[in-house]
Amino acid sequence: MGIEFPNSDSFRLRLIQRRIGIEGGIARIMMNFSVWFVT
């Protein structure tokens, strides 16, 4: 798609924020599992 929307930057920023949120949630779950296994 060669069409550039005026709010493409905000849309990209929203995608990046959502991806960071998903990765952060996965990292939190992994840390919780590691703590649960260690104790």
Image (cartoon, grey):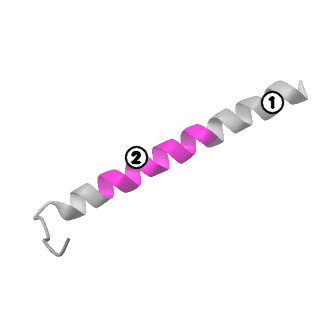
29 horizontally vs 11: left or right: right
Under circle 2, the secondary element is helix
**Which label belongs to residue 18?**
2
Under circle 1, the secondary element is helix
Q: Position of residue 32 (x, y in %)?
A: 72, 30
- Is 38 located above or below residue 1 in the figure? above
25 horizontally vs 27: left or right: left
Residue drawn at x 76%, y 30% as measured from the top left:
33
Q: Position of residue 3 (x, y in %)?
A: 13, 71
Q: Quadrant of residue 12?
A: bottom left
Give the magenta range.
Answer: 13-26
Q: Quadrant of residue 13?
A: bottom left
Main SS of the magenta segment? Answer: helix
Disc 1 packing (10 Å; few <14; some 14–19; many ≥20): few
23 horizontally vs 12: left or right: right
Quadrant holding the N terminus: bottom left
Quadrant holding the C terminus: top right
In the rendered image, residue 7 lying in the magenta stretch gets the answer: no
Question: Disc 1 vs disc 2: which is toward the camera?
Answer: 2
Measure how far apart labels 1 and 2 are at the Cα level.
26 Å
Residue drawn at x 55%, y 47% as measured from the top left:
23
Q: Position of residue 27 (x, y in %)?
A: 64, 42
Residue that badge 1 annotates? 35
